[in-house]
Amino acid sequence: MMSADSNPFRRTVLRLRLCAEPMGMEEKSLWMGSCFTENLGPWLGSLGYPVSSNPFGVVFHPLMMEKLLFASIEDFQAFHFKRGDVWLNFLLGAPFGAASEDELGRQIAEAVLNCRQQLRSVNWLVLTFGTAFLYHHRDCGPVGKCHKLPSDQFEKRLSSPEEIVHSWKEAIIRLRQDNPGLRVLLSLSPVRHSRDGLEENALSKATLRLAIEELRTSLPSVYYFPAWEIMNDELRDYRFYQEDLVHPSEEAIAYLRKKFEHTFLREEEENYRRLAEDIIRMEQHRPAWPWSEEARLWQNRLESKKAEWSDRKRE
């Protein structure tokens, strides 16, 4: 299959803005946002970076992300509801759900406590905005998840760039009161929300991009990773999409990771990352016969690489 790097056809290549404060292997990051977050955050964690990804599950709208970061347990309780024999919450999707309201409350309380603790100590907050369309429940107000309930219970509204900027300016300033060195990385999910309609999706993405640019230029240590532009300009061919034609393919995700690494990770730590990838590949291709001489040699090589990886991390 033709790769993005060896493509012989003409293509536009994005000029990336290198981060002035690149992320180091010892720096903690909290990732939050759309499903695209799951393509980058856990990957970075697999390389040995201290990463926490989506403590409240996947979240698409920036105003909901801000609400989740600061909501109290009582705020969450106002959004509990029961569907059949399952207790759910309008602010949260999977994995939050329980057979009793008390158990759901415990799940949420644990996530809130964990998130609050991390926000006080992380070096990076990474946010991937997915959509500017916000759903309002007729009784509860703005929600993060509709849980496949009838559409007549909700009204869809487009948030403005000004709303998003106001919300997140205040949020970043507030977060930095407890964590003064916090850096923020914003991204626009390259996943098309085609169910809204392609015209509506374009309007939504443009709204989010305007908000991101205002936040980036008006606050210190706020950065932008152009995943949306890379996907739509460098990788505009549909062979870089999954069968649904909206989600990036594995090849596209690998390309975006490489671009992220080049832009936001320290160059001097590249050998460490390659060693981590070698270990991952070895563990994915274990010898078929664990008692064989081949397996013994493989195990020795693996342990040697892990020891080298640990030594480098302590340096």
Image (cartoon, rainbow, N blue to C red):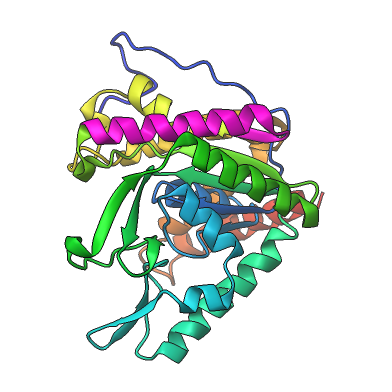
Which residue is rendered at x = 43% and y = 14% of the image? 13
Position above or below: 79 against 240? below
- What residue span does the magenta drawing correspond to? 199-223
Which residue is rendered at x = 63% and y = 71% of the image? 114
Tag count: 0
* Image side of residue 280 versus residue 5, left or right: right
* Image side of residue 8 versus residue 33, left or right: left
* Image side of residue 180 versus residue 255, left or right: right
Q: Can residue 27 be seen in this view?
A: no
Kindly give the residue lying farthest to the front in the view shown.
Answer: 139
Which quadrant of the figure contains the N terminus?
Answer: top left
Kindly give the residue lying farthest to the top in the view shown.
Answer: 10
In the picture, residue 220 is in which quadrant? top right
Position above or below: 138 against 194? below
Q: Position of residue 189 (x, y in %)?
A: 41, 39
Which residue is rendered at x = 68% and y = 40% of the image? 23
Q: Where is residue 18 in the image (x, y as percent from the top left)?
A: 64, 24
In the picture, residue 208 is in which quadrant? top left
Position above or below: 58 against 161? below
Depth order, front residue of 286/138? 138
Q: Where is residue 130 in the image (x, y as percent from the top left)?
A: 40, 44
